Image (cartoon, rainbow, N blue to C red):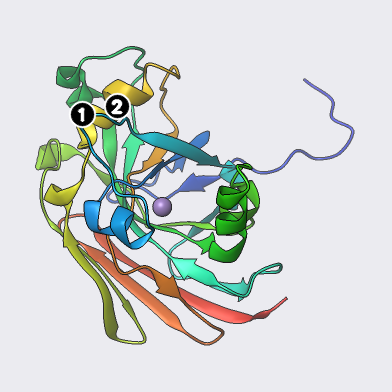
């Protein structure tokens, strides 16, 4: 038995719909600018013919399950939601073909890539890493995972988000600039993808700020519904 100087942190994990076994999360990859209208609202249009997708990561310990109340985070005055389809990897893959995507997908979830937008934009302007804006405690919200089953490779379906019942984001998975097979092929050029990897596939247009006592709810067809309540500042 390995002896530790103090008890190690728990393994981050998510429920799996229809199973008592949880999905253990080892890495969280996030895709930047993967819907044209969102790229435009952020001031960085995407030309797929000349550009490639880019990624940032969140520490697995930032994971928090849908339904939670999270404190309004420290260090920001512009705390944003980003509603996203999450792909959960279930089989290893390195330098894979697009035709390998389906066998690599364990399932899907709805996620919120919560963002300290003011810190992200300062970092972006100064050419610095986005970590302070993206990789902070309780910033990776996720629903239980729906096994791939007969969903196959998702190519369409409504993705939407409401704040206090008012629709803020409404788009379709078919509007992804880089679809799921393309993302798995590209990301696997840089990483040995493995079971336990989550991929947040990017957010559609309509991102915006929330404040204490706001309630976020989101939906993705055939995948699930997510909710998050914003508590008081820490
Ligand atoms: Mn995002």
Position of residue 216 measured from the top left corner of the image (x, y, whole percent) = 39, 76
Q: SS class of the residue under badge 2? A: helix
Residue located farthest toward the right when viewing the structure as drawn: 5
Residue located farthest toward the top when viewing the structure as drawn: 95
Instruction: Give the position of the N terminus as an image quadrant.
Output: top right
Instruction: Give the position of the C terminus as an image quadrant.
Output: bottom right
Q: Quadrant of residue 218?
A: bottom left
| Image side of residue 189 versus residue 99, left or right | right
Q: Nearer the viewer, residue 149 or 114?
A: 114
Mark 1 in CB contact with mark 2 (< 8 angstroms): yes
Vertical placement of residue 192 versus 76, above or below: above
Using the image, tell me which numbered label, if any, was put on residue 181. Answer: 1
Residue 131 visible in image: yes
Residue at x-position 56% and y-position 72%: 78
Vertical placement of residue 149 versus 94, above or below: below
Q: SS class of the residue under badge 1? A: helix
| Image side of residue 24 versus residue 76, left or right | left
Position of residue 54 measured from the top left corner of the image (x, y, whole percent) = 40, 35
Q: Nearer the viewer, residue 18 or 42?
A: 42
Q: Under 8 Å from ligand 1: the CB of mark 2?
A: no
Using the image, tell me which numbered label, if any, was put on residue 80. Answer: none
Q: Residues within 10 Å of mark 1 (few under 14, many from 20)?
A: many
Residue at x-position 22% and y-position 35%: 48
User: What residue is pinned by disc 2?
Assistant: 184
Vertical placement of residue 234 versus 5, above or below: below
């Amino acid at each position: 038995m390995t002896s530790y100087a103090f008890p190690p942190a728990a393994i981050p994990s998510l429920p799996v719909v229809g199973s008592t076994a949880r999905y253990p999360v080892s890495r969280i990859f996030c895709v930047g600018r993967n819907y044209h209208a969102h790229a435009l609202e952020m001031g960085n249009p995407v030309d797929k013919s000349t550009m490639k997708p880019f990624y940032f990561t969140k520490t697995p310990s930032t994971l928090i399950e849908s339904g939670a109340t999270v404190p309004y985070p420290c260090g920001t005055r512009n705390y944003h939601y980003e509603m996203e389809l999450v792909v959960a990897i279930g089989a290893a893959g390195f330098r894979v073909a697009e035709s390998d995507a389906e066998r690599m997908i364990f399932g899907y979830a709805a996620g919120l890539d919560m963002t300290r937008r003011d810190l992200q934009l300062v970092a972006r302007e100064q050419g610095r890493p986005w970590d302070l804006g993206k990789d902070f405690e309780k910033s990776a919200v996720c629903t239980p995972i729906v096994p791939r089953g007969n969903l196959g490779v998702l190519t369409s379906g409504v993705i939407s988000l409401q704040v206090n019942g008012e629709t803020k984001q409404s788009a379709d998975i078919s509007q992804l600039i880089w679809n799921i097979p393309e993302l798995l092929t590209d990301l696997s050029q840089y990483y040995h993808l493995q079971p336990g990897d989550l991929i947040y596939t990017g957010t559609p247009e309509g991102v915006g700020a929330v404040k204490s006592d706001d309630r976020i709810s989101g939906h993705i067809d055939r995948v699930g519904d997510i909710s998050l309540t914003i508590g008081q500042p820490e």
